Image (tube, rainbow, N blue to C red):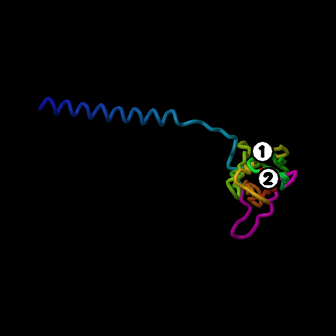
Amino acid sequence: MNKSKIKNQKSKIKTLFLFFFLLFSFLLFSCKNNNTGLSVSDIRNPATADGIDEQQKANMPIFLFENLSYDFGKVIQGELLSYTFHFKNVGATSLIISGVDASCGCTTSIPPKAPIKPGEKGEITITFDSKHKNGDVTSYLLITANTYPAQTMLTVFAKVVSP
């Protein structure tokens, strides 16, 4: 066999070995045990094709917010404002928030990542950016959780005036 062919085959084998080594390393180090304390029993759906299972509905987590809306009042255009909505899980099982979607890009939120156990309190902090707003502004936040109903709406208001 030609020396250049042997050298070329050795190079291919080294490259292939390096590829698999890097792939194995990536898979080994990217696997983390993210134990969130969730179990399958925390996820319930009382709505079936036959209707609502009242017993299962009674065992679900329940949001109890101090208030479902907040009015920032009169603000100067460009202000960055924050407010924290406080709630309590008054249901029978852990409350898990899977998402908070805002009606516009001017409002962002920080929901709790850990489950809220029955009787515990939680909070959702929102930030409203009035930079490109003017006049009366209403922004909605739709919270999706393992509650029944599955979605809860929060509302924030502001009257944005030019500087």
Residue 131 or residue 93, whichever sits in front: 131
Per the rendered image, the range of residues in magenta is 44-67
Which of these two is toward me, 134 or 24?
A: 134
Residue positioned most to the left? 1
Query: Label 1 belongs to which residue?
Result: 116
- Image quarter where the N terminus lies is top left
Q: Measuring 78% from the left and 50% from the top, which residue is drawn there?
A: 163
Marks 2 and 1 close (CB-CB < 8 Å):
yes
Inspect this view and state whether residue 79 appears: yes
Category of crowding for the residue at label 1, using alpha-carbon neighbours closer than 10 angstroms: few (below 14), some (14–19), many (at least 20) = many
Check disc 2 and report the residue beneath it.
Answer: 61
**How many discs appear?**
2
Kindly tell me whether residue 56 is visible in this rendering: no
Residue closest to the eye, 83 or 5: 83
C-alpha distance separating marks 2 and 1: 9 Å
Seen from the viewer's position, the closer of residues 9 and 125 is: 125
